[in-house]
Amino acid sequence: MGDILCIKGGVRLSGTVRAQGAKNAALPIMAATLLLEEGTVLINRVPRLDDVAIMADLLRHLGAKVDHSGELMQINITHDPRLFETPEGLVRKMRASSLVLGPLLARRGKAILPLPGGCSIGSRPIDLHLKGLARMGANLEIRRGAVYATAPGRLRGSRIYLDFPSVGATENLLMAAASAKGETVLENAAREPEITNLAQALTTMGAVIEGAGSGTIHIQGVETLKGGPMTVIPDRIEASTFLIAGAATGGEVTVIDVVPEHMEALLAKLEEAGASLMVKESSVTVRVDRPLTGVTLKTLPYPGFPTDLQPQMMVLLCLAEKTGVIHETVFESRFLHVGELKRMGAQIELQGNTSIVTGVPFLNGAEVHGTDLRACAALAIAGLAAKGTTLLKETHHLWRGYENFVDKMNDLGGKIFISNENDVCSPTATSLRELPSLQ
């Protein structure tokens, strides 16, 4: 996509923004509908994102009817055992495509899944998914870059220990176990709120699940699941991105319709850095009226500090006094944005999986390239806080995870224009170009 963001820096963000539904909760809930023999599922608060559109197209390819109107998505499932192969063109666009593997095996007994794509933030193999499904009786083979899987008869419940608390593996195995024969116990399971939201959705469909949100989940498989209404939780990563943007620009931003407990790791670090917080039942306000100071943080699985907020937090540390340190322990290649921030005047030293950030008085606008979804958001924040104009290219990553990102930032006082190579930073750019179509 040729769109670039022209960002006029030096703003102080101020105002209120509503959090979108969580992308990382909506995608597995959508995939879970494949567990139905037939029926209708209504999902509320589904964000309009490129990744959601890709998952909707994937479900359509597998025989579902999907209608996404506003925040409401209706999925109608008619079981067709002949539809079990996923198209390479869709799967390679998004790693979360792997989430259809478990439901397809559980309900249709077969699946062909090209190895999925996604952001370039390091190796993210799906071996934990495959090992768990094999424990449940699936026959798996990888050839020509795709997984060929069969489940003779019905998947069987099993005790499965995950070597790492992978969110995707936990979700895939949780869905497969919901329709397996007997009980499945997932040990060292991921504890993210999105896991709990998926379990709530599966329970609405008739699944029997205990312990979601803890390290051990018990699932008693049932033969038949039904449709029903369900709601996606607020997106803690999107909400946190706006809080960081408010803090990095020395502003005051309130995010509403959130679950503050889901953001405790971030809130603790913002407070440690010197930001003032007001936390209510479903909203968080951040205010910065004095210089921030560097902090040390380590990315960890939930409830630790999210790796999906590491690039955004790095921008804040670039503008803080003293030195901040970031230890990245989840993805080995999630420092690709460092070079781009250095183009803006940041002082960052990389030592393996550790980033040492020495704060500078200000960043300068520059031409930068988004390397992945969260890096794009971070560079946009850097552009808003910087002196001068920043041109952010490779913005297609951004539309994968942020709904109405430009409008929301501009409603807070930002000055971001969507432009293209032939119309860079035109004052009329926002009226000439619209956000990418999500139809």
Image: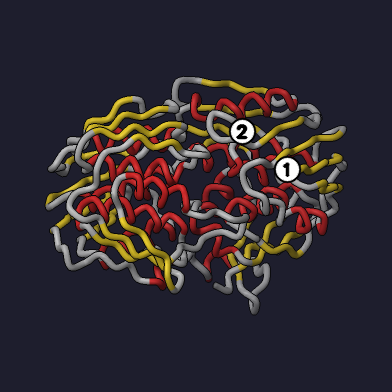
Residue at the image position 52 percent from the left and 60 percent from the top: 118
Where is residue 140, by image quadrant? bottom left
- The residue that label 2 is drawn on is 305
Report the front residue among 361 and 79: 79
Residue 263 point in image, percent of width and height: 54, 30
Residue at the image position 44 percent from the left and 36 percent from the top: 161
Mark 1 packing: few (<14 Cα in 10 Å), some, or many (20+)?
many
Which one is earlier in the sequence, the residue at label 1 or at label 2? 2
Q: Which mark is residue 314?
A: 1
Residue 108 point in image, percent of width and height: 20, 57
Q: Which mark is residue 343?
A: none
Q: Nearer the viewer, mark 1 or mark 2?
A: 2
**What is the count of numbered marks?**
2
Give the answer, above or below, for where 208 lies relative to 56.
above
Amino acid type at image mark 2: Phe
Instruction: Residue 74: tell me if it is visible.
Output: no
Question: Helix, strand or loop at disc 2?
Answer: loop
Give the answer, above or below, for where 28 lies relative to 18.
below
Amino acid type at image mark 1: Met
Residue at the image position 74 percent from the left and 46 percent from the top: 385
Residue 193 point in image, percent of width and height: 43, 33
Give the answer, above or below, for where 78 lies relative to 179.
below
